[in-house]
Image (cartoon, grey):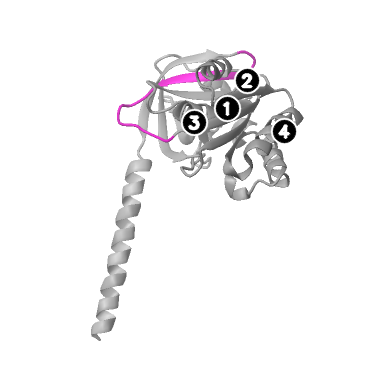
Amino acid sequence: MKRGKKMLVIIISFIVAISLISWGLIAYLGRSQTLEVKSVESLGGDIYLIHMTKPESMTWKAGSYANISLTQSGQNTYDAVSGATYDGKEKSRWLTIASNPDENEILILTHNSGSPYKKNFTSLPTGSKVKINWVGAGLPLPYDKEVLVCFASDVGIAAIRPIIRERVGKYEISLSHLNKGVTAFDEEISELTKSYTNLTYENADSISKSKEQLKKSIDKYGNTAMYLLSGQKDDVGAMKIFLTENGIDKKNIKTEYFRGLK
């Protein structure tokens, strides 16, 4: 009887502990914070870089993503990631944060796909309010590797840029960008290569060219490196297959798909 009572106490204590942990995570990750739009920068074509204020209490890891929505008084609520309206049925979506916590703003790099919602997001006037929720790590970085081999396609560079800024000078980093006309951070990263000899940066105009560039890193580093892939689903999928076919262990490949591009 005493044994059964002791077991019951252990079970109840475990349930309480799990509940407290879950509550803490929801309280921390699920809290909504209001940001103000500083500017919406048109980068040519349908590419936009949105600059937003950063709350002092907000932090995240390089390569993280977040749920972002825009509310307009008296109108529908818009999802700033996918452009979808919140009518009670549409679930929120996610967008990668292209900046680091030590910067004084939150950057969002996105396409205006032509939908009314993306048009709304990319035409926000200065001073507009948006809400950010549920910040999570998109590309968790290893601490047992000293080499990062990165591939980004299109606006997937948004996930890689903060990682480079955080790790440059500390890690050996190689980046191939299948840019598809997205040159938002090209000048910035190119300038970093002049200051840090352990950073290499190459642009590509085709997936085959990116494979050629990554093959050099594969031959040099093999499985001693961590491979970070970010961008359009088809490009990331093709590059992941290419890496595994060339002997890279799946555990050394981290991916971030930008499903909301279309």
* Residue 178 located within the stretch drawn in magenta: no
- The answer to whether residue 179 is seen in the rendering is no
Q: What number is the disc on residue 211?
A: 4
The kind of secondary structure element at disc 3 is: helix
The residue lying toward the viewer, choosing from 168 and 32, is 168
- Between the C-alphas of marks 3 and 1, the distance is 10 Å
Could you say where residue 133 lies in the image, as x and y percent from the top left? Answer: 41, 36
**Which residue lies under the disc numbered 1?**
157
Q: Would residue 30 be found to the left or right of residue 188 on screen?
A: left
Q: What number is the disc on residue 182?
A: 2
Q: Amino acid at mark 1?
A: Ile
Number of the front mark, 2 or 3:
3
- The answer to whether residue 245 is seen in the rendering is yes
- Between the C-alphas of marks 1 and 4, the distance is 17 Å
Could you tell which of marks 1 and 4 lies nearer the N-terminus? 1
**What's the residue at 69%, 33% (across, down)?**
216
The kind of secondary structure element at disc 2 is: loop
